[in-house]
Amino acid sequence: MSEPSHTAFCPQCQKDVPFIHRGQKIICQACGFYYLAQPAQPDGENEGERFGGRSILKSIAYVILIMIGIVVVGVAVLFAGCALMLGHSL
Ligand SMILES: [Zn+2]
């Protein structure tokens, strides 16, 4: 068992047979029928990467929102303080 194999339905044998993976080809061990491997796994990896990127963007957006919130609250406190000070001094 040097090559990875799996059992799948072969349209030529009309039954489930062990297929072996040889590069891009997935070959029926019983009759030699083969089909080209679909790049399904790379797509999954890309999806994972996209999800990872999205989560990173989400966390960056979250941090930016928090910073904006802090700045807004700080400015509001400063304005309130100034207003109070002006109100007291006037
Ligand atoms: Zn076959």
Image: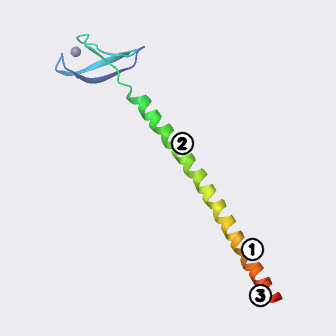
Sequence order check, earlier mark of 2 and 1: 2
Q: Nearer the viewer, mark 3 or mark 1?
A: 3
Decide which of 23, 65 is in the foreground and name it. 65
Q: Residue lying at the far top in this picture: please name it.
A: 32
| Label 1 environment density (alpha carbons within 10 Å; few <14, some 14–19, many ≥20) | few
Q: Secondary structure at mark 2?
A: helix
Mark 3 residue type? Gly
Q: Amino acid at mark 2?
A: Gly
- Label 3, on which residue? 87
| Left or right: 87, with 8 as reference point | right
What residue lies at 77% left-to-right and 87% top-to-bottom?
A: 87
Front label number (2 vs 3):
3
Q: Is residue 3 above or below residue 62?
A: above
What is the C-alpha distance between the residues marked 3 and 1? 14 Å
Whole-percent x and y of residue 21? 37, 17
Which residue bears the numbered disc 1? 78
Pointers 3 and 1 in contact (C-beta within 8 Å): no
Mark 3 close to ligand 1, CB under 8 Å: no
| Residue named by callout 2 | 53
